[in-house]
Amino acid sequence: MTTVRFADGAEVPALGQGTWRMGERGDRRAETAALRLGLDLGMTLIDTAEMYGEGGAEEVVAEAIAGRRDAVFLVSKVYPHNASRTKLPRALDASLKRLKVERLDLYLLHWRGSVPLAETVEAMERAKADGKIARWGVSNLDVDDLEEIGPALRDCATDQVLWNLEARGVEFDLLPFCAKRSMPVMAYSPIGQGGPLLRNRALAAVAARHGVTPAQVALAFVLRRPGVIAIPKATDPAHVRQNAAARDLALTEQDVKELDAAFPPPKRKRPLEMI
């Protein structure tokens, strides 16, 4: 199984599990079962956030990891408006309570808001010193935002961003920036939103050659890049198994050439895409 190493030496699977839109109106038992199946298949990194279902997703995760905490690399994210030195501790405590754990393996700023980055970093470092998080990082920050963090960037574990065949802007500068600093990148929505992307003819042609689904090809495309952690979300057992199987899909040079023709890589700086 391919793993990705953080700067502090911690290793995690390159393929994890996302939880966006869990804990809302869906079947929580099915969502819990899907996450547990993913854990059984080695996708032991689970990413969630206080925003997802306004804490509902964290509650689903709590059920999924019950009795298995030591085998899970647990990630959650804080709202920008809760990322101040006074509010972050309270938001973190609330997440820990919903997750029924004493510490997060990784805590991220969900996106940039009005709180200065320096203040958020200070609050993150305090949470780390208090033993409530093992490491911290950011999400949806572009290169100029990361540079603004300054010397503390060496302690930033990751940047979680939108990256898939339809949203490739980060390949121009953000991915190289992070790679140069040995900072892993977490790719959310690595197979898009399951719409036009998965109906693309070129993607379907590559999938047909390998006898797999278009979603598996899209996921394999992201996983082929070193230092990237993909966190697709799945609630259907078949989709969970397909995601896991994508780890073994090796795309050929011809496959990549055809995908590049259908989804051209960026030739210039693009605004950071978010959903």
Image (tube, grey):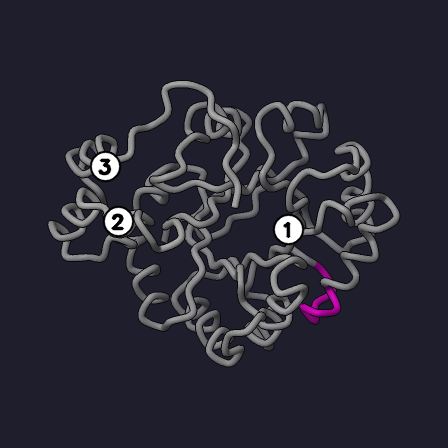
Give the Cα distance between marks 1 and 2. Answer: 28 Å
Mark 3 residue element: helix
Task: Please tell me in which quadrant of the rendered image residue 223 appears.
Answer: top left
User: Number of marks in the image?
Assistant: 3
Query: To which residue does mark 2 refer?
Result: 217
Q: Foreground residue, 40 or 99?
A: 99
Q: Position of residue 256 (x, y in %)?
A: 22, 35
Give the Cα distance between marks 3 and 2. Answer: 10 Å
Q: Foreground residue, 11 or 268?
A: 268
Mark 1 residue element: strand
Query: To which residue does mark 1 refer?
Result: 106
Give the Cα distance between marks 3 and 1. Answer: 33 Å
On residue 259, which mark appears? Answer: 3
In the image, is residue 37 above or below residue 274?
below
Q: Residues within 10 Å of mark 3 (few under 14, many from 20)?
A: many
Query: Which residue sits furthest right?
Result: 86
Q: Residues within 10 Å of mark 1 (few under 14, many from 20)?
A: many
Q: Earlier in the sequence, mark 3 or mark 1?
A: 1
Let me know if residue 101 is in the magenta part: yes
